[in-house]
Amino acid sequence: MKRTLNTTLAAHIDEPVRLEGWIHRRRRLAAVTFLVLRDRSGLAQIVVSDEATRTALDGLPEETVVRVTGTATANAKAPGGVEVTNPTITALSAPAATSPVELWRPHLDAALPTLLDHAPLTWRHRERRAVWEVAAASLRGFRTTLDAGGFTEVATPKFTATATESGANVFAVDYFGRPAYLAQSPQFYKQMLVGVFERVYETGPVFRAEPHDTVRHLAQYTSLDVELGFITDHRDVLAVLREVLAGMVTAVSEQEDVCRLAGVQVPVVPEQIPLIHFRDALRLVGADPEEPDLAPEHERELSRWALREHDSDFLAVEGYPAAKRPFYTHPQPDDPRWTNSFDLLFRGLELVTGGQRLHEHADYVAALTARGQNLDDYRTYLDTFAHGMPPHGGFALGLERWVARLAGLDNVRRSTLFPRDLHRLTP
């Protein structure tokens, strides 16, 4: 007999079935015991009336893995209108140890340290698991949209010989006796690969040795990176980002039960994302015009403005100061103090950084020299631009931040399977 998933029981009324999963909850009454079984699809109710089976079930606590064979029987009062009767229950694991949290409860009211310390167990809770299912749906939407747009998925090294952004925020490692670093981003490699495939994307971990202990920062997170060639400027990149976000939202919204369990407020991606220049954004929030970046409170105020004035959960801020952007960022043609770059704000938080890159070899040499960098440290990267590269640009989106904002979570660690931060290296 093949295994039947819990949520497909209704298709097997009056037929023998075999279920496998975890004991989610047991309720013993005078003459019958109700067993709720959990598998990856959901919950099923098993009615146990045989006294020997009831006694055996008493010795199998919640989270024990079991096999149940019996008959699928229609019952309008049962979950899904069907239950399993006349069951035989076989333990597939030793009786489970007492869980630090009660996973059978509808809501998991546990403190964040408890959730993280016991993540292999707490992710079993339906609401917690739904949060990552939102992440998985987002990844599907990301890939599907870009595949349809002629992009090629790539995989780049996570050990690098030089820092991508700056030397202050990298994890140094001993690479067979030589110094190396964990990649801060796939930036250099995805640019190189534009010269091969024109349009590329990657999903993978990136590492930032920033000693931030905040609700929005991690030492390792999942970056969704995109790079494309033959653009006019950064607004072409923003247009692709808009399509990607729409594809991710569509993939998430198709899973209504998951969205409900995770508490997702599905946003509407506007046909054109509202856009404001950095200098105008500073003026709007009453900030010092010499500020090189937006503070978190500025991001929140700008998002409130975008929602109020444009009915949009999204706002793109373009033209960040050149002093604040990496050396490969293309200057704004009419005023090189600013750049052809942008950040995308989503519900009060910076979610995406993107823009147009330099593509001429001479411009890279000048930019690195102006910053006092040793050209030999970037030789392989620089050589790429000596062999003909198109105007190009791209963006990077943090998956865990995206999911946290979708689900209204107060800490990015709640949307991360096994967070790595200033204090946490386990589990």
Image (cartoon, rainbow, N blue to C red):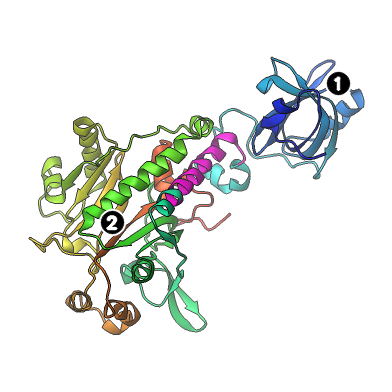
Mark 1 neighbour density, 10 Å: few (under 14) some (14–19) many (20 or more): some
Q: Which residue in the structure is indicated by mark 2? A: 354
Which quarter of the rendered picture does the N terminus lie within?
A: top right
Q: Secondary structure at mark 2?
A: strand
Of the numbered discs 2 and 1, the one sitting upstream in the chain is 1
Report the predominant secondary structure element of the magenta stretch.
Answer: helix
- 125 horizontally vs 34: left or right: left
C-alpha span from label 2 to label 1: 62 Å
The vertical placement of 76 against 149, above or below, is above
Residue at 29 percent of width and 54 percent of height: 353
Residue 36 falls in image quadrant: top right
Residue 31, x across and y down, in percent: 85, 16
The vertical placement of 8 against 382, above or below, is above
Tag 1: amino acid: Ser
The vertical placement of 181 against 32, above or below, is below
Magenta highlight on residue 137: yes
Residue 384, x across and y down, in percent: 31, 77
**In this orientation, which residue lies closer to the viewer: 24 or 45?**
45
- 174 horizontally vs 93: left or right: left
Magenta highlight on residue 228: no
Q: Which residue in the structure is indicated by mark 1? A: 49
Residue 156, x across and y down, in percent: 45, 68
Mark 2 neighbour density, 10 Å: few (under 14) some (14–19) many (20 or more): many
**In this orientation, which residue lies closer to the viewer: 370 or 148?**
148
Residue 354 falls in image quadrant: bottom left
- Magenta residues (range): 124-143
Name of the residue lying farthest toward the left = 334
